[in-house]
Amino acid sequence: MMNQPSRLEFGSIIGERYRIIRTLGSGGMSRVFMAEDLKLPGKHWAVKESIADPKIMKIVRTEAEMLISLSHPRLPRIVDFFEYPPSGAVYLVMDYIEGITLEAYMRGYQGYIPQEQIIPLALQVLDVLDYLHTRQLPVIYRDLKPANIMLTPEMEFKLIDFGIARSYKSELDQDTIKLGTVGFAAPEQYGTGQTDARSDLYSLGALLLNLCTGGKYSEWTAGVEGYIRGELPRHLIPIIRKLLRHHPEERFQSAEEVIEELRRSADFQSAQPGKSMSYASMDYAGTRVVAVLGVSSGSGATHTAIAVSHYLARRTHSVALVELHSTAKAFARLQEVVEGIPVGQASSSRRFEVDGVHYWRQTSRADVISLLGGSYRFIVLDLGNGQDNERLEEFLRADYPLVVGSGAEWRVQDITGLARSLQRHPQHKWNYCLPLASSEAVRRLRKELEHDKVFALPLHSDPFEQDDEMDQVLDELFRGVITDTRKKRFGFLKRQH
């Protein structure tokens, strides 16, 4: 509620033109009313009444003039400004927007709005932020939150309540006034520096995290990963994590950067079934997920996941190989060899390193989400041959899903059986790997699946070691995903001897 009583009531007229009809909302130092226009019958406006300290009235007047100059389809037009010096009240007259706030909309869904609405909403917010931030005198909004986003009946977004927006002044080290909503405001809004475009981007990250956790979180704190909705697009997580970095220089530096990142991700996600994918859209900064799923026991999923991880590490950097199974034993045995741990005595750390690849043993989904917010270029998920809901979901959501099946003629049908059982899911991104398969088996499977991304994997006894034949296959499998910056050969098993 506004701390001081309003001087407006039903029937009050301000500016000799606007008659107050009813209260729309209130909070902090302001109250918003609906008013009818006496000069334009039938026209309604929103009138915002705020209390301004007389000492800063000049600043308020300047800011009002700035807001009146704005023109963007996702902003309400601010058409008039009045002052009432005796009470210190000031009035902004703006478009009345029919609809409900995003906050109210979320309540209708118990916090869980449809996931397909999240990215379009983010792009709309970024569109208006880009407009504000790129003006000759940049405008910093400083209070992005669900209560300040209005959704029209046509699901169009409007940004409302410019009560604490300000023009960016390069000569200032800090903001004169520290304002914002706790949980959505950037750290620098609490006195550590001047707010700029990156402050609004932090608030966007808080808003997105709030949407992705059903309204539970708006700050990246310990344990938040476990509350992120499982059905959300994978690429959103590292974007949100970067937006929420504590230091502004570690965040995205402009709304345009975030827009490009979301669009590149969306281009990758929306590749059409039955068409060859354009892999150029994958070659950008950010964590990409490769998921390796075996169709049956002994098909070679772990062996393939290791080979793929070290292949990627030789050509890029920052690769994590994750064993997504809490009771799997393969990585534990490997860690014993690498670290010289006595057999059966588990290490206190679940992470170990081999030739630049970070191995994570017996990992949960929450751990994967946390890793996505880090600095890895690629995360390779070893799903084994498990097709439980959690691992299957991770496979279906991966940027680059790999199915590993036996190359034996009599077991090739295992792969077609898996494809049929999951035919309700899009399969255009899938890649099929057949260890030791004949060219005839590959040709036949491509025909049966009507899919050209089927590969025979050659004999590769040491998956940690570079093998020219294996590299040729993986070069084709990952064509366009990474640039070829080959590093020296590795010999993990040789060193252990």
Image: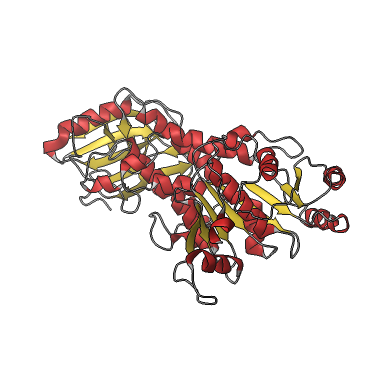
Give the residue furthest to the top. 136
Q: Nearer the viewer, residue 130 or 311?
A: 311
Give the residue furthest to the bottom. 344
Q: Where is residue 273 drawn, in percent x and y?
A: 74, 40
Q: Nearer the viewer, residue 271 or 38?
A: 271
Q: Residue at x 69, y 52 (%)?
A: 460
Q: Where is residue 279 drawn, in percent x and y?
A: 63, 35
Give the residue furthest to the front. 497
Q: Residue at x 43, y 49 (%)?
A: 241
Q: Is residue 355 left or right of residue 205?
A: right
Q: Where is residue 81 drawn, in percent x and y?
A: 27, 30
Residue 303 appears anywhere in the view: yes
Q: Residue at x 76, y 45 (%)?
A: 455
Q: Is residue 124 above or below residue 431?
A: above
Give the residue furthest to the left. 55
Q: Is residue 82 left or right of residue 234?
A: left
Q: Is residue 285 left or right of residue 296?
A: left
Q: Where is residue 474 drawn, in percent x and y?
A: 67, 43
Total tally of numbered discs in the picture: 0
Q: Nearer the viewer, residue 284 or 226?
A: 284
Q: Nearer the viewer, residue 382 or 22?
A: 382
